[in-house]
Image (cartoon, rainbow, N blue to C red):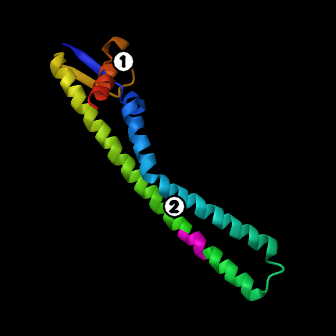
Amino acid sequence: MKVGYVNTQRIFRDAAAQKAGKKLEGEFAKRDQDLQRMAKQLQGLQENLEKNSVTMAETERRAKEKEFAELSREFQRRQREFREDLNLRQNEENAAVIEKANKAIKQIAEAEKFDLILQDVVWVSPKLDITDRVIKALADAK
């Protein structure tokens, strides 16, 4: 009986998963920058309120507080949507990596006549580990 083992965590640390991470960074960079600008704007408003609220007229102070509260709610909403969208895309990219890895594992198993290939076990002898071959197959598939 021929047995092999694949370390899934190493596959995710591999360049294929890192490439997916860079792709997501590119997709979400503009939204992230927008959120950072909005956070700086909020911080500026808060500092202005803290510094000048005593000398402001009551109506001006209330208007600034209202503006701050509305911007803060909008920032939190956008931040929440950003995180949800990013998580969804990360899950999609991870699923694609897993799908490609499973195809590579199956090809290696058939080509090298493995009877059993295990993933994610507590301990395995290094001589059974075929993770490097799977990583190489993923890199070659590009």
Number of residues whose C-alpha sits closer than 10 Å to that of mark 1, classed few (under 14), some (14–19) or many (20 or more):
some
For image coordinates 34% across by 20% down, the residue present is 132
Mark 2 secondary-structure assignment:
helix
Number of residues whose C-alpha sits closer than 10 Å to that of mark 2, classed few (under 14), some (14–19) or many (20 or more):
some
Q: Which of the two labelled residues, at mark 1 and mark 2, occupies the earlier sequence position?
A: 2
Q: What amino acid type should be assigned to the residue bearing mark 1?
A: Val
- Main secondary structure along the magenta-highlighted residues: helix
Identify the residue under disc 2.
Answer: 79
Q: What span is colored magenta in the figure?
A: 70-74
Lateral position of residue 87 relative to residue 36, left or right: left
For image coordinates 45% across by 62% down, the residue present is 81
Lateral position of residue 21 relative to residue 60, left or right: left
Q: What amino acid type should be assigned to the residue bearing mark 2?
A: Gln
Q: Position of residue 13 (x, y in %)?
A: 42, 31
Q: Quadrant of the N terminus?
A: top left
Cα–Cα span, label 1 and label 2 = 42 Å
For image coordinates 30% across by 19% down, the residue present is 130
Mark 1 secondary-structure assignment:
loop
Q: Position of residue 93 (x, y in %)?
A: 34, 44
Identify the residue under disc 1.
Answer: 124
Q: Position of residue 89 (x, y in %)?
A: 37, 50
